[in-house]
Amino acid sequence: MSYAADFMAEVKARNPGEPEFHQAVQEVVESLVPVLEKSPHYRKAKVLERICVPERTIMFRVPWIDDKGEIQINRGYRVEMNSAIGPYKGGLRFHPTVYLGLLKFLAFEQVFKNSLTTLPMGGGKGGSDFDPHGKSDMEVMKFCQSFMTELCRHIGQFTDVPAGDIGVGGREIGYMFGQYKRIRNEFVGVLTGKGIKWGGSLIRPEATGYGCVYFAQEMLGTRGETFKGKTCLVSGSGNVAQYTVEKLLQLGAKPVTLSDSDGHIYDEAGIDAEKLAFVLDLKNNRRGRISEYAAKYKGAVYEPYDASMGFNPLWAHKADCAFPSATQNEINLADAQTLVKNGVYLVAEGANMPTVPEGAELFVEKRILYAPGKAANAGGVATSGLEMSQNSLRMNWSRPEVDAHLQTIMKDIHRSCVEAAAAYGMPGNYVAGANIAGFIKVADAMLDQGVV
Ligand code: NDP
């Protein structure tokens, strides 16, 4: 068997029942084969073997009492994957599908992503199988307080600094920060994505979506093109999707879709600033469903999602660019084929691992501009890094200052990916470029720090 096949057999045997983690590792290992051949010292020091094992995994019970007075029990997790280049950093996800393997995949991706940002951050991820949908604010607060009561022993501004992810936005970060402060009696930057009035950074809410579009803009630039007049498909309608649409509008593109787990809307006339404001209120304040968009805007069509169809019709609308911004594996092979057939020639992943491996292979093979999540959505964690810097300095930077940092970081990540891919004989392959550039920095730090 080849090195990659042997390696994967071992990873699967040691991490049974964790398909998303296997998928994430497989993609990275395949990209790194040429690096390990050229630099055998990484292989001798078993760097890759070590990177695939979390430095620490914390699992705990999260009991809380709902509005009816009934006791509820959820599971809480924090995967501290790698601290070679800085404190663990990565989001918390609250979603019923959360289990250890899902968080290991996300924490693994985070290690490479954080390395690409140029900032000193290691990788981690955490969360719970708690579902915030349909819960009252009081229930969300009680859950967050119980979750943080245990998590606060394991995190800290120099140790591990969580942020938001699916199901964890400003509201949840606020409740968790309050509980951390109460128990530990310290006001420090232990979480990012905080409110602007109490330590948060301007542009952090926008950063993942904006950063993804900045990265895509760099890719278009390699072909001498801009976003002006480009039709764009966007999935999801949460934090990442909302600010992807906002930046696309600012750059003259026409976003035409949004979705949630129930279905998607298609608005041929384009989602403009006024319609986007409606979506922000719908999703962030009223916590409603995207179907309400089509009820409000007559030209728009809503189509419910039906998993038994074997494809997602959102990806079948004619467009130039696609921004998957909902969840993992939301573009299957049939969707990827449809996108390519319809002439979509840029895919920038706002979500983490939204494309199945066969779909990603197709994008690479067809030589479209394809940015994997660990490069394209790194603007979120990068701006979290900037929030940490501002907290340490006890200063707040202005919107233009943070935005300028974000743009520089996304340009740097783009350049690193392009250069690493070219150096290893795969020009234009952003998947290989991101994996290689992200790996080398972490691997060298691990070598410097000995067998720990
Ligand atoms: P939000 O919770 O704000 O929004 C998630 C959106 O995706 C919602 O519209 C949600 O619909 C939809 N969604 C979630 N799960 C599924 C599912 N299983 N099937 C279909 N739709 C689903 O999360 P974010 O916008 O923060 O995160 C979106 C993606 O971006 C995730 O992959 C996340 O890991 C990634 N990401 C986020 C970053 C951030 O800064 N927030 C940073 C980097 C990556 P519904 O309400 O129906 O569940």
Image (spheres, rainbow, N blue to C red):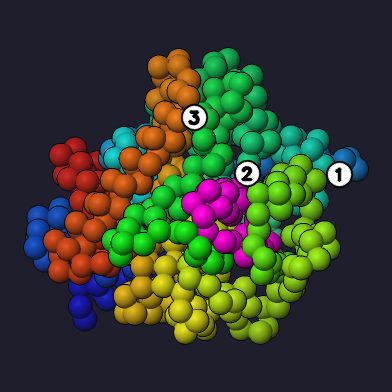
Q: For disc 3, does the CB lie below 8 Å from ligand 1?
A: no
Q: Which mark is residue 70?
A: 1
> Where's residue 412, x and y in %?
28, 45
Q: Is residue 375 left or right of residue 173?
A: left
Q: Residue at x 79, y 53 (%)?
A: 288
Q: Amino acid at mark 3?
A: Arg
Q: Is residue 395 magenta?
A: no
Where does label 3 land, which residue? 399
Where does label 2 land, which residue? 168
Mark 2 is surrounded, within 10 Å at the Cα level, by few (under 14), some (14 to 19) or many (20 or more) other residues, namely many
264 w.r.t. 448: above or below: below
Q: Amino acid at mark 1?
A: Glu
What is the C-alpha distance between the residues marked 2 and 3? 23 Å
365 w.r.t. 219: above or below: below
Q: Is residue 254 magenta?
A: yes
At numbered mark 2, what does the secondary structure look like: helix, strand or loop? loop
Magenta stretch, residue numbers: 235-260
Q: Quadrant of ligand 1?
A: bottom right
